[in-house]
Image (tube, coloured by chain):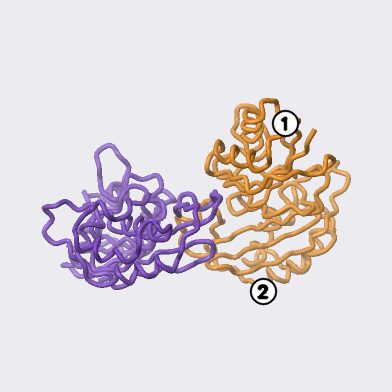
Chain colours: A orange, B purple
Amino acid sequence: MRTVKLTIEYDGTIYHGWQVQPGLTTIQGLLQDQLSRILGHRVHVYGSGRTDAGVHAKGQVAHFHTPKSLPPEVICHALNGSLPCDITIRRVEEAPPSFHAQYDAKGKEYHYYLFNQPIRCPFSRNYALLVRTPLDLDPMQEALTHLKGTHDFFSLSVASEDMKNTIRTLRKAELIQKDNFLVIILEGNGFLHKMVRRIVGTLIGVGRHKIPSSIIPEILQNRDKSLGGLSVPPNGLFLMSVKY
Amino acid sequence: MRTVKLTIEYDGTIYHGWQVQPGLTTIQGLLQDQLSRILGHRVHVYGSGRTDAGVHAKGQVAHFHTPKSLPPEVICHALNGSLPCDITIRRVEEAPPSFHAQYDAKGKEYHYYLFNQPIRCPFSRNYALLVRTPLDLDPMQEALTHLKGTHDFFSLSVASEDMKNTIRTLRKAELIQKDNFLVIILEGNGFLHKMVRRIVGTLIGVGRHKIPSSIIPEILQNRDKSLGGLSVPPNGLFLMSVKY
């Protein structure tokens, strides 16, 4: 049995997220359907983790098992020829038999794009969150220094009370300007559900002077979900890469 | 009667072009419907020219007449509040009574985006033409020097034989690299139907060594439509600005 690793890029706009759901079009579902057809047996695709509906990926990673000997480049070509054009397989590689896209992941990098302009832009509507009021970047940068490092991120997620370990490490927490966009870059050893989107919502609150950056440590320590910003929409969120 | 000037940005992907067509959704049609509703009288919108189905605009210009005194910023706000989010009104201004978006135009600038990579990209599929084979840029640059200036562009258009004047001046004809894209920039005093898209098709032929750049003057002089490259798809084409 071979283990094959996939690196996948997708525009998540029209999809119901990564994970298979009955009656809904999902990335995992499409990959499984096409791989099963190409390889002639039922294929289960294991992703590095889910992405929610509307979230994009530039470097999602997944693996699957097959007894067939089809070369990686043939699988890649066949997949790209049959998948819709908003999903692209960037790489297909042989992996060690024990490789697991989720359990072996050492970290992930997410980017969230903000379009901070008074008027919307037709071309960024699916790829960046429009924030019409000017954001003050200095307190946002300060907030990021409080978020970087190892913390209990329970209060900046939608993780449930009974989740055992909600401590995560952010190795990178940056805000940069890129063309007309502000990009929030978060790299960490793992992310709780909606953690990136609640961090971004909190940072927007800080940039609007609604949340003082100095209370970030308190928000994290109190494990109180009501103190941070709301979860922002999925359209600005990109899973950039998975680290192994 | 006031004359009001509009500057409009749109993602043309799902539209049947600029011009009103019965039973089809067009940019002009949507603008006329919404302006008529906002102003309470039938409004005709005059564009600087048509854009074909699937073509985008960052700076299309149009005008309309109204006896109503609604301030420009109110019209702008009302339009942006009612138009779909792939159309944005960037500016609404008072214009001299005689202003005409089409007849007063001194020129236009178009950009055409090429994504010259072996694998497609989900995020550029609607905004750049995928060209999988590597393009040789030097002969393309040379071809552009032959295209710049005043020529009869009949053979690089789909203009009909009985069109009187097919002589146009390209004031700018450039090829630049921008991130992962090649951008062909054409600015001229006017463009024949599909002229930009046939010029780009010809340049791609030159970049693939299918058309020698040295025969460009001959293609133009012979008024023979069969010699140039084919018209490329609309997805990479942007009307950037109209000059007055």
Quadrant of the image containing the N terminus of chain A: top right
Residue shown at the point (68%, 44%) measured from the top left: A92
Q: In which quarter of the image is residue B190?
A: bottom left
- Looking at the image, residue A153 sits to the left or right of residue B48; the answer is right
Tag on residue A68? 1
Question: Does the image show residue B81?
Answer: no
- Looking at the image, residue A97 sits to the left or right of residue A128; the answer is right
N-terminal-most mark, 2 or 1: 1
Q: Which residue lies furthest to the top in this view?
A: A41
The answer for how far apart the CA atoms under marks 2 and 1 are is 55 Å
- Circle 1 chain: A
Q: Quadrant of residue A218?
A: bottom right
Q: Is mark 2 on a helix, strand or loop?
A: helix
- Looking at the image, residue A110 sits to the left or right of residue B234; the answer is right
Label 2 amino acid?
Asp
Tag on residue A138? 2
Say few, some or many: other residues with alpha carbon within 10 Å of mark 2 (under 14 / 14 to 19 / 20 or more). few
- In the displayed structure, would residue B192 be above or below residue A29? below
Tag on residue A55? none
